Image (tube, grey):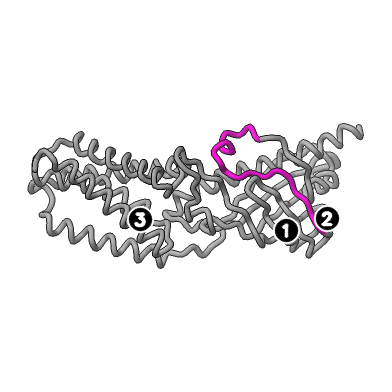
Amino acid sequence: MKKNIETISILFTLILSFLLGIISIEILGEYGWTIFVLIPFLIGFIPSFVTSKVKEISRNKSYQLGFITLGFACLGLLIFALEGLICIIMASPILVLLTLLGAYLGYISQGKKVMNSTNTIAILLLATIGLMSFDRMNEPKDLIPVRTTIVVNAPIEDVWTNVVTFNKIDEPTDWIFNTGISYPTDATIEGEGVGAIRYCNFTTGSFVEPITTWNEPNLLEFDVKEQPIPMNEMNPFWDVHPPHLDGYFRSYKGQFKLTKIDDTTTQLEGTTWYQVDITPEIYWKYWSDFIIHRIHKRVLNHIKKEAEEVEKRIN
């Protein structure tokens, strides 16, 4: 028993983790505290907790058991086409931190240092039920704004022309767009003024944007009626399409605000309002804001380049 307890504890943890993951994602439709807090904590805690009931283990051994289990769990997500490599990498800081915490608490729980097994199991069971319930109740309510601003050395009228529509943008050099993250390529419009339909085309499809404010040349506002998936997931084994690509990140509206600094200089601000239905929101908001800023910069820098080239040709 002592010889095989480590393997048994790892296998038990993997089975339990996948069962909790299936319940949370496939049945409850939630990517939240259960997935990103409870499961990585259990991955760190259970192997060392179970093993320590049979034999004494060191703190380093506890960490080793936790990270071996985490490694197998991530490999399983890839092999069984449940997730992509990029999202695992994006989640890795929080996964590592919670696994580390779980492993440490599993280590100090051995013997009589903390509590008996019955109390520990009861607390973990209550925590599991509580976090799953919290996921169901913790729906996003507020739109999150992301604003990016640049200065364009061109008259406001030339900048406006390139805001409404813009031709094909050069291939990206930003590393984030080499990971499968969708990025804008060009924009077209049908009609003019309020009610016109703008299409901002991305590598995975088009954002359909009905114009709600057309205040030429100062403000263009639009809603987002339709949007494509945010990325094409990378997986070394299969093509994958995890559920979080559909509806867990949603852009609701956007705007371009132009401010005249002088006759040949314009401040251009792009804003996107979005919701992310993945928790902990404070963690995933960081990633979302980072990516949206990069998308904004790609578009704004292209508008800047086009408008400034027009100004150079005139002068």
Of residue 114 and residue 249, the one placed in the foreground of this image is: 249
The type of residue carrying mark 2 is Glu
Q: Earlier in the sequence, mark 2 or mark 3?
A: 3
Disc 2 packing (10 Å; few <14; some 14–19; many ≥20): some
The type of residue carrying mark 3 is Gly
Of residue 150 and residue 36, the one placed in the foreground of this image is: 36
Q: Earlier in the sequence, mark 1 or mark 2?
A: 2
The type of residue carrying mark 1 is Glu
In the drawing, does residue 266 fall left or right of residue 250? right
Percent coordinates x, y for residue 10 in the rendering: 22, 44
Q: Mark 3 = which residue?
A: 21
Q: Is residue 78 magenta?
A: no
Disc 1 packing (10 Å; few <14; some 14–19; many ≥20): some
Q: Residue at x 53, y 57 (%)?
A: 246
Mark carried by residue 216 = 2
Alpha-carbon distance for marks 1 and 2? Answer: 11 Å
Q: Residue at x 79, y 49 (%)?
A: 165
Q: Secondary structure at mark 1?
A: strand
Residue interval drawn in magenta: 172-190
Q: Mark 1 = which residue?
A: 221
